[in-house]
Amino acid sequence: MRAIVLVIVLTAGFALPAPAAPAWEAVAPGLDLGAFAAGIPPPRGDGRITVLRIDPALWALECLDVRRTGQSDGLTARQWCEAHQLTAAINFGMYAVDGRTHVGYLESRGHANNRRVNNYRSAAAFDPRTDGGRPAFRIFDLDDPHVTVAGILENYASVVQNLRLIKRPGENRWQDRPERWSEAALAEDAQGRILFVFCRTPYTMREFNDALLSLGIDVVAAQHLEGGPTAQLCLLADGRELELVGSFETGVLDGVENRTAWPLPGVLGIRRR
């Protein structure tokens, strides 16, 4: 596996801005970028949360992984974008020690990376099978008595199961634990838009959830994708380049100096419809 050194856009001396209404930069139609102060004093780092907001009516969400593409090695988020003409990419979730297998259920457009349903309580669904009025993107809570992965698959061709951060309709469900890390997350807002979320500052996940819910961007559900030095987000759109990579993770990397993107066995990416 290769490791590529990436330039981090966030500057080390970034100061927390004063609280303000959410401000979005229009990157392309249906694609907006925001950088927000978490509102929680950072233990290390700049205390900033970066959010890429995606309209699923204009952008198709796709899951790519080495089992599907036949690659022998993983790629960094940027390399996934460049190799497969993706406009943006983020981790697809945690993966097993084989470096190829997603740890939760993952099936996308007829390809199954892992058909084992575990006890993770969040499932993101996209690619509706019919035009029956179903949302193009939806994060489901698997402890809802009316929801199962099998049931979701009847209506959607792509399902990715991950650890839950925020339960619908905006409830922080992470236990108050001391572990902290840089975070890459997938979220949904009240309008059904896809949110790629990245925070290099190592917060506990309960702190991160509280911060995300307080940003005023109408988050209703979210799932954990990856933490620590493996967390990544890349955007390559109309001359705009943004490359973010995580660092600190309790018990894994005790520092915020990492500037190296690790190869990933899979990503969630977007492309224009």
Image (spheres, rainbow, N blue to C red):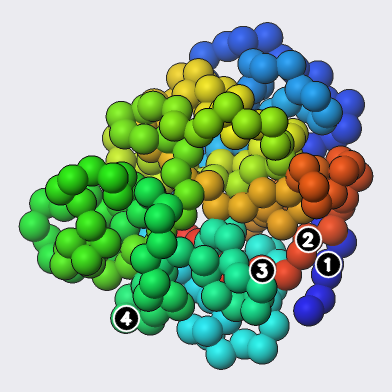
Q: Residues within 10 Å of mark 3 (few under 14, many from 20)?
A: many
Left or right: 20 as drawn, with respect to 258: left
The answer to whether the residue labelled 3 contacts the one labelled 4, judged by CB atoms less than 8 Å apart, is no
Left or right: 86 as drawn, with respect to 171: right
From the top left corner, tell me how far across and down residue 272 is, in percent.
42, 61
User: Of label 1 and label 4, which has the lower sequence position?
Assistant: 1
- Mark 2: amino acid: Ala
Q: Quadrant of residue 79?
A: bottom right
- Mark 3: amino acid: Leu
Answer whether residue 213 is visible to the viewer in this image. yes
Residue beneath the point at 36% across and 35% down: 167
What number is the disc on residue 110? 4
What number is the disc on residue 261? 2
**Front tag of 1 and 4:** 4
Residues 185 and 162: in front is 162
User: Of label 2 and label 4, which has the lower sequence position?
Assistant: 4
Residue beneath the point at 48% across and 38% down: 165
Seen in the picture, residue 146 relative to 107 is either above or below; the reply is: above
Q: Residues within 10 Å of mark 4 (few under 14, many from 20)?
A: few
Q: How many marks?
A: 4
What number is the disc on residue 102? none
The answer to whether the residue labelled 1 contacts the one labelled 2, judged by CB atoms less than 8 Å apart, is yes
- Dot 3 falls on a residue whose secondary structure is loop
Residues 220 and 250: in front is 250
**Front tag of 3 and 1:** 3
Q: Residues within 10 Å of mark 1 (few under 14, many from 20)?
A: some
Quickly name the residue at label 1.
Answer: 4
What number is the disc on residue 264? 3
